Each structure stands twice: as C-alpha cells, then as structure tokens.
Amino acid sequence: MVLPQEDNYFSLRLDESRTSIDSINHTKISQTVHERYPNYENESTLYPTLDYINRILLEEDIDEPYSEYENVAALSDMEKPFYDILGEKYPPSPNTELILSQPKSNCNPNACILNNEIIPRSIGIGLTKESRGENLLVMEFQRGVEEGKKFLPTINNLTIDTSRKKMSSEIVLEGRSSKLSMFYTEETIRDEMFDKVLLDREEEYARENISHLPEIRKHQANQQCNQKENIEDNINLKSLLVECSEAVAHGDPKKAKELIKKLRKHASPFGSGTQRLACILTDGLEARIVGTGSETYRRLINRRIPTREILKAYHMYITASPLLRIWHCFANDYICKVAENASRIHIIDFGIYFGFQWPPLIQALAKRRIGAPKLRITGIDLPQPGFRPAERLKQIGVRLEDYAKSFGVPFEYQCIASLWESVCIDDLKIDDEEVLIVNGMCFQHVRDEALTIDTPRNRVLNLIRQMKPKVFIIGILDVSFSPFFTSRFKKVLSLYSMLFDMFDTLVPQDDEGRQLMERAVLAPPIFNLVACEGQDQVERPETHKQWHTRISLAGFKLLALDQDIFKNCNAKVKGSYHEGFFVQEESDWLLQGWKGRIINGLSVWEPKQE
C-alpha cells in the first residue's frame, strides 16, 4: 500500500496531555465570565487568555511554545460526545479564526506536525494509519470517554462497565499528582498476529520464505532491467550527498542549502533504496545546518509507536533477512544449553526493547524433558517521556506473563526504566540459587567518552562482572564511525546504502513493513549520526575486534563458539534466505553479513576467575 505524499492527518496538532476536557472547561469558564460580565465583548482577548490559563493549570511543561489546534472540524468532533455524555447541547464556536494557527505559508513543506512537534516529513510520513495523527487522536479521545464514564452518574442510556478489569498498564506511575494524568491507549497484549510472528515455527518460516522466492526473483529481474537507468541517478545522488556534507563540514551554509534544494528534487521516501536513504540524510544535513539536530532527534526517539506497528516491521525483517532472527536464535540456544538442568533461571536483558526475543525461549523451555524451570526476566531500557516512563516495559511483562502461562512456565518479571549505567546491583535482586544470564544486544546506544577511562560503557560492563553471571551474551553492530564529520558521513552512506540495497533486492517498495522499518527503526540512528555531535551523538558502535578488547579488559573471558549452535544458525540462513546472506566464524565470534560485508557480530563470555 503506497502512502500518499501529502498526509492531512499530520496537519492536526496533537497534544497528549491535553484532551477535550480542556475544551469543555474553556467553554464553561467562558459562559461564567459572560454571565458575570454581560457587557464584556472583547472575545479576541478573552479566549486566548482563557486558553493560557487552562494551559497553566493543565499542562506539565508550560515553558514550551504554545500552539492551538489547526483543524476546527476535528476539534468539534472531539467535543460533541462529551456534551452528549453531560446531556447538554453543543454550542457553536464563537470565533473559529482564533483557533487557527499561523498561516500555511510559514510552514516548512518538508516537515510534518505530530504530537505538537515538527519532524522531518520523510521520517514522519512512514507511519501507518494506526499510528497517524487522526487515529492517535481518536484512540486517546475514546480512552478519555471510557475513563470519564466512571465518574459520571447514570444519565439516559449512559452505562458504566464496573466489571472491566484494570490492566497493569493503567497503573499511574510516580508523577505530579496535582496534574491531570496523561491519557494512555491500551495496546493489544497478545493475539493471533503476535503468535504468528513471535513463536518459533520453523516449517512456517521456511514455507513463508520459499513462497516469496518467485516474487523476489521477479523483483530482481525488474531491477536488472532498470539498473542501467537508475545507476547514474544513484551515483549523482551519492555525489551530491558527499558534496553537501563537505560544504557543511567546511562551514559553507550557502552552498550546502543550494545542494539540499537539488537533493530534495531527486530524493523520495517512496523511491529506490538510494532515494529513500538520501531523503533521511538530507533531513539530517539540513538539521545540522540550522542547529536543530539534537532537538529533532529527541522528538524522533520519543514518538510512541504502537507495538503492533513495530511487530509489522519486525515480521518483514525476519522474513526477508536472517540478521535479527539469527541474533535471537543464537542467544536463546545458548541460554537453553547453559541452563539445561537448572530449576531456576534469571535473565537480565539490557535493551529489552519490545521483548520479541523471549516468547520463543519460553516455548523452548516448556519442552524440556525434565520440565519447565522457573523463569525470571529483568528488562532494562531507557525511560519514556511523560507520566509513565516504564509503561512500555510493563506491557512487555504482561505479554510475556501471558505466554508463560499458556506454556505452563512459572514466570516472574521486573522492569527497570533507567540509563544502563545508572542501574545498581541492588536493583537486580540477584539470587545465588538461580542460574544468572546477562543478555545485551544494543550496547552501541550506551555513551562512550573516549577521553575518560570510567565511561558509561565500561561502567555497565563492570556492573555485569559484579553480577557474576554464568554467561554474558552480547550482540553488536560491527562497524566503527570516525569522530570527524566528513569521514563519518561517508561511512554512514556506505553502510546504510548496503542495507537499503538489501531491502530493494528482497522487499517490494510499497511494502508496509519495509516503510515502517526504514522510517521508524533505521531513520533515527542515521539522523543522529549526521545531525548530532559531541554528547548528543549517542550512536557509537564499535567493531567486534574493538569490543573483544574492551570486554577482555573489563574482566571477561571469551568462550569457544559452540559448533552445534553455529551449524544450526548456518543451516537456517542457507535453507530459508537469499544467497547473498552469510554466516562465518572468526576468533570465536559469529559474524553475519550481506554480499560479502559483515553487519553484526555475536559472542558469549564469562567472568574471569579472581
């Protein structure tokens, strides 16, 4: 399904902490003022003043720039059901012009508005219907109506669902109790789609991948026909990108802006892989020029994308590519082997993300001949902004608990929403009677100040060594970027051109999962590497050789690569995926790649004996 280039949904400015209750209070206060002061006619002053008072009372961050809703019709649609609940007639808007924001001519045509924030259009429009502005607004509103019903008396046909079970995701975390809590939209915990994607069904994987082979071959044939036509355009785009990065590095904004205009004419979020990558890189270069890179990046990573949308991207990725699937299989096979006879297992997962790795492990543990062990998982990840920083992590626990219950595996879960280097060993509740396993798959996100010894990255490794785990399993993106901008940009262009070429070879351009993967998963790190500098550049991967040295110095010993697990991973790649993928062994590391280039590495370590 090809998404439209102009998405009117994103012109609606959404504010998660401000709902239609705001509008009702606005109208009530307005009526009260008119009753007490009937001769007061200066509404142009009155309404903005009331809005500002409401903002101070109801908003958490009153220092942020204030903007009003653009779409009056959508605002009215939100307000009317509240009036129906209260049994009142919806009044007409007294002055619709006051609700409109600044003129359209002042808007950036290359940007879109989401959650009251401007983000690059090439990144923002990649979200599918469920995660777009209108649907987020509708879901938040419907959630607000359901919560509001609990506090209202019975009026006409109004019913209150008292039997509704409150999920853990609705528990309010620590926050400012004097404020209105942010509405939260409940997500699907588990359904048929989750089972199809997450559970280990080897035969279905093979059938699904094989069924795609004719389509892939046809796609490749079309590519070869168009290759001669597109190769010149791709070279020109890459040359323009490198030239623009050099202009930025040399402090020539005039030349850089001229080149950006040329890039905008050829780059497209719906075109070839090179055009899509050029779109993201151009956004990063432009943000770097105007000095908004760090701010825009924070907005990108703080967007709340529904788990189901991430699941679509994940499904596309593991179906077309073995890179992430082998990553998970490697770790889970090692855990099953290390804890083969254990009655209690504790897994500490640094960077649990959405927890997609663990349902297949629960399924495998349930099939043990000696019976399922008691499994405890501690999920660690960065906190989300807002009133519920651990909400996504709590949802993961609810989902995993449901899988464990269905497979008959005793299960316990705790989550820690924190910077990894801020976690203390006491937070982990380590029990000596459990087989402790540490899993870490996103260490490139941990900061690393090269000029100091006690870096956050080293502090996390020292913490893991203090835990004394049975094994420490690590997966890394096997690449290193230069601290100098021009060299780093060329390396980013080279690496991600290969990944986008991989998608071009294996996945149709209009595939929904591909669009989500490119713009929701790949775009933020690319943008960070190009637009940010210094401490704001959080993406700092290292090669497997660099990690080998670092982990060894932290007090760990590399374990020999298990040949049975290596052969199993190699068989999966060769049996179900494109011939361009490969798995190889190097110094007890398992390395994966595409068309001769290594992309990631996996290894298993244990603490050295003191």
Image: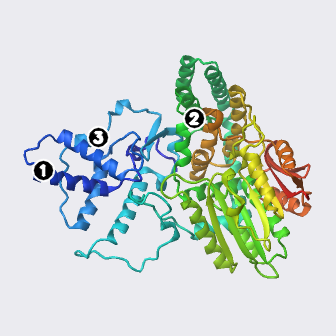
Q: Quadrant of the C terminus?
A: bottom right
Q: In terms of sequence position, does the residue under pointer 2 or pointer 1 come before the other?
A: 1
- Label located before the other in sequence (3 or 2): 3
- Residue 443, numbered label: none
Give the SS element for disc 2.
helix
Q: Residue at x 44, y 47 (%)?
A: 115
Image quadrant where residue 142 sits: bottom left
Do the residues under discs 2 and 1 have CB atoms within 8 angstroms?
Answer: no
Across and down, in percent, residue 220 comes to 70, 44
Instruction: Choose between 4 and 66: the one closer to the eye.
Output: 66
Q: Is residue 25 above or below residue 193?
A: above
Label 3 sits on residue? 100
- Disc nearer the start of the sequence (3/1): 1
Q: What residue do we see at 89% from left, 54% from top?
A: 558
Residue 287's x, y, as percent? 54, 31
Name the front one of labels 3 and 1: 1
Does residue 16 appear to the left or right of 457 in the view shown? left
- Count neighbours of disc 3 (C-alpha within 10 A) and say few if under 14, some if 14 to 19, many if 20 or more: some
Say which of marks 3 and 2 sits in front.
3
Task: Give the answer, above or below, for where 246 lies relative to 404.
Answer: above
Residue 34 is tagged as 1
Q: CA distance from mark 3 to mark 2?
A: 30 Å
At label 3, the amino acid type is Leu
Q: Nearer the viewer, mark 2 or mark 1?
A: 1
Please indicate, yes or no, whether residue 221 appears anywhere in the rendered image. Answer: no
